[in-house]
Amino acid sequence: MTARRKTALVSPLDDKRIGFEARTLARDHMAVKIWLRMLSCSTQIEREIRNRLRQRFGTTLARFDYLAQLERHPEGLRMNALSRYLMVTGGNVTGLTDQLVAEGWVERVADPADRRSLIVRLTAEGRREFTIMATQHEAWLAEMFEGCEKGLKESLFDMLGRLRVHLSEKEAVAAPDGAPAAKPLKGR
């Protein structure tokens, strides 16, 4: 058997690449299998994007996400709102803000509605630099999904949207203390 033939027989999901899905067993509940498969896909994509951002732009995914939120809000955001959007602590946002202000990509300005508060927003330079990164980021994602049938991508998008709605509905009927109502698991 030639080296080329041996390579063709190696699964792209070998022991080194299977990730979270390696934790599942045939007897596991389908909810566990779905969760781990989604987590595996998300982690795989995120790892690749992190690597590419670091190699191409010398930046992190956290900085990219921060800049993306400000790009979506050209008028700027209060630090607490930015922290909520990014789902990180205020300390994390403060650290990133300090770095990006020093680099000239972000500025702090007084909030016209409340002079005691500050708003952070992209500078013209920050907007230019982020636009370059965002264009490349989108191209990388398109490349990763290249080869998947259009119908598959549309179905996946639709199904994940329905799942988000379902999960939000479940969250809305959670117990008063915020914990989900306990129900026995069925369908193993």
Image (spheres, rainbow, N blue to C red):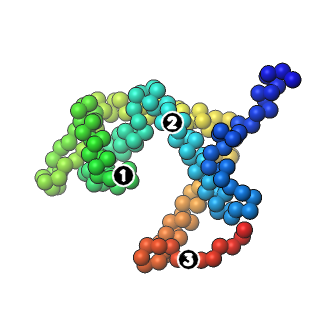
Query: Tag on residue 182?
Result: 3
Describe residue 146's horizontal placement relative to residue 122 as left or right.
right
Mark 1 / mark 3, whichever is N-terminal: 1
Give, as a three-letter code, the residue at label 3.
Ala
Mark 2 / mark 3, whichever is N-terminal: 2
Q: Secondary structure at mark 2?
A: helix
- Residue under label 1: 88
Percent of width and height locating residue 46: 52, 41
Using the numbered discs, state the Cα–Cα distance from disc 2 to disc 3 in whole angstroms.
Answer: 37 Å
Percent of width and height locating residue 99: 27, 36
Picture residue at 50% right of the left edge, 32% below the top: 51
Q: Quadrant of residue 126?
A: top left
Describe residue 104's horizontal placement relative to residue 159 as left or right.
left
Q: Secondary structure at mark 1?
A: loop
Mark 1 / mark 2, whichever is N-terminal: 2
Using the numbered discs, state the Cα–Cα distance from disc 1 to disc 3 in whole angstroms.
Answer: 28 Å
